[in-house]
Every structure is written in C-alpha cells, then in structure tokens.
Image (cartoon, rainbow, N blue to C red):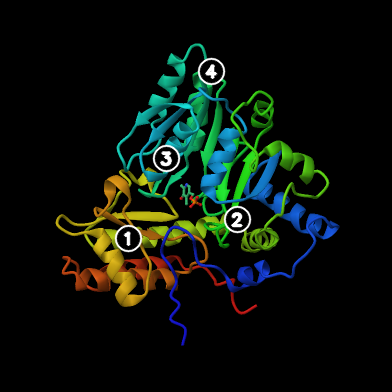
Amino acid sequence: MSAQNPVFIPGPTNMPEELRKACDIATIDHRSPAFGRMFRPAVAGVKRVLQMGAGEVFLLPSTGTGGWEAAISNTLSPGDTVLAARFGMFSHRWIDLCLRHGLTVEILETPWGQGAPLARIEAALRADRDHRIKVVLATHNETATGVRSDIAGIRRAMDAAGHPAMLFVDGVSSIASMPFSFDAWGVDIAVAGSQKGFMLPAGLAILGVSPKALAAMETARLPRCFFDFGDQIRSNATGGFPYTPPVGLIAGLARSIEMLEEEGLEAVYARHHRLAEGVRRAVAAWGMRPCAALPDLYSDTITAVVVPEGCNGTELVQLAAQKYGVAFGVGLGEVAGKVFRIGHLGMLTDVMVLAGLATAEMCMADLGWPIRLGSGVAAAQAFYRGTAQPVAMAAE
Ligand SMILES: *Cc1c(COP(=O)(O)O)cnc(C)c1O
C-alpha cells in the first residue's frame, strides 16, 4: 500500500499525476526544433499568468533563490543601493543575497506579521533626492508569516514619490495561486519557481522582466554568467538555450499552465481564497489566530498559525510527520516554535484541506493543547458546504 498523504507545506506542493507524467519525456536534442516547440508555449503561458505584455520571460534551471540572484546580477552594479522591507524569513534572505553581492541595502525593519510598509517606502524614496536607490524589492507573499503585501500600493508609493527606481517582486509563493498583474502594477522583475503554484518539481526559476529592467543590463556590472539574461535572449530568439535546458520541467510548465487555464485563472485564485478561508475559520475555532496582523494581509496560499502560550509549533510539525505521515511547515527565524504553517496552495481540494486540519487537531490533542477535537474541522466543513463549487475535475 502507498502511504502517500498530501503535503501541507508551502512548497514544494502536491503534484497532479498528469504533471508528473508531463515532465517524464524521452530525451530530445535541445538544439533541434523540437525544443523550440516545447519552449515557446511555456514562455507564452508564463506571460499570460503574469499578465505581462512587453518584456521577456526567462526559465532558468534553478529555484526561486536563483531567480533573486538572476534579477539583481543582471541589473545592478557593486555598491548600488536597493530598498527592502524585512518582515519574515524570505524578505530577509533576499536582503542577505543582495548584501553578499556587494549591494547596499536600505532596510526598513518591519514587525513580522506586518506587510510592506507603504508610507515608509514612500518616505524613503522621497528622502532619496539624488536617486541612489535603484530598486525596491518586495516580497509579495511572505511565506514565513503568511502575509500578502500590496504590490499595487508599492507602485503607487513609488509614483507618488516621483522616484525612478525599478520594482522587483518575489512572487514565488503567490504567482499562479493569487492574482498577479505585472503590467498594471508596474513590476520590473517578477520571480516565481516551479514547485509552488505551478505544482511541478523544484528546478525552474521563472522570471518576467520588463523593458526597463532589460535596459538596465547595459550598464549593470555585477558578475553573471549562468544566469546572464543576454545569453538567454540571444539563444531563446532562435528557440534555443545557452546550455542544456531542463526539458522535462519546461514541458511540465507548459502543461501546468494549460491545466490552470482549463480551470480558469480566476477560478484558481477563487479556489485558493476559499480553501484559505476554511483554514482561517478552523484556526479561529481552535481559539488561535494567524500570524498576519490584519485580515487585509491574510495570504491565500499559507497560514502561519500562532500557537497558544506554552505550546511549541515545531513539536506539532514533528509529531505530524512521525505519527501520521503528514507534512506541515515549521516556524522560521523569529517565529520558530511560535507558529506552525499550513500550506494551502497548488493541487488541493476541500476534502484534502479537511484531512490536513483533522491531522493538525489530532496532533494538538496528542500534545495536550487546549483544543476540542473536531472544532476546527467543523468550522471549515460549515464554510466549505456553504460555498462548494461544482467539481470540474472529475475523472478525465
Ligand atoms: C519558496 C520561496 C522562495 C524560494 O525558495 P527556493 O527554495 O529557492 O525555491 C522565495 N521566496 C518565497 C516567498 C518563497 O516562498
């Protein structure tokens, strides 16, 4: 018997059987036209998901972290200044990556559980009269705390300050699961990864790059080679790749986007919102609360649950793995032990989420936490029953 349970970590996410098969293809010669036929639909699909017109999409053999590195190394020079708010482990890691590349980072320290501080971003840009700040970095969905920031609001703050900086957005745990509008938000680089909303194995960094960011390459002096956009542009133009591409993942990405579009992107976002709302009802019924400070900030892909005083979220995650074979996310950094995280993105249904909530409850009861078995599940059940959508995914 297979003891495979769904995972409730915020990535890698559960993979549809169909996408596992789509990645499993025979060897092809990546210098033959067969590669271009596989590559172009994936690139075109990413543009549709990002809602992006002009600019380039790059599919790099890497993960989200490599996507961050590609973004900065192609557009900036040593000593350049970037502006970033730090309010969780992922915003922290992007800042750390910039520092290690010799950039100057103006850091807006922000309490974990809050989102990007729009007024402070605007004030920092207004104060920067000689335009030293080249880029504003924004973590759309801070996966450590379950906080979604207002990217359109950051663009408005930048415009209000009349500042010419570029806007780079980490959308690794939001893109393909929550609405994203590259053009409307004036994004210059968006970074995603294959293993979250796209429901694929890890291995691809997926980037959308605006004409303005492409132009910045001309003067950017940070060293780059493997991630050089220039090499990609020259090869991609003829349907090729500067080195051996991960063809299985690229084939999988094209199929993933077809699946998302068959469901309908708006329906995909609505499904994530419903699933998330059910989880939040369960959390409230347990007498707990999300780490995100305000409902406006609630993420539809991940909920970091603040555990009661005297309880340890990491113990719940360990017990769930050992006793029930179910994966939740541990608290990271500042909130280690204080939260556990329920990932609710990718291939998930009401029924799967209910199983995850039931497992979390069993662990809480095992650990002697003050909850009543079934309380969270019942709250989510009531919500899912009342809002159920006709199932479009029946045996195809
Ligand atoms: C997962 C994640 C990343 C990237 O992580 P990789 O392991 O390098 O793919 C970056 N940012 C956020 C917000 C994430 O959730």
User: Is disc 3 surrounded by few (<14), some (14 to 19) or many (20+) residues within 10 Å?
Assistant: many
Which residue is the site of mark 3? 91
Inspect the image, locate mark 3, and give the three-letter code of the amino acid beneath it. Ser
From the top left corner, tell me how far across and down residue 349 is, in percent: 48, 69
Residue for point 55% across, 51% down = 63
Which residue is the site of mark 2? 265
Which residue is the site of mark 4? 162
Check if mark 1's residue and mark 3's residue have beta carbons within 8 Å: no
In primary-sequence order, the first of circles 4 and 1 is 4
Inspect the image, locate mark 1, and give the three-letter code of the amino acid beneath it. Arg
Q: Residues under labels 3 and 2: Cα distance?
A: 26 Å
Check if mark 4's residue and mark 1's residue have beta carbons within 8 Å: no
User: Is disc 1 surrounded by few (<14), some (14 to 19) or many (20+) residues within 10 Å?
Assistant: many
Quarter containing the C terminus: bottom right
Q: Residues under labels 3 and 4: Cα distance?
A: 25 Å
Q: Which dot, 3 or 2, sits closer to the camera?
A: 3
Which residue is the site of mark 1? 281
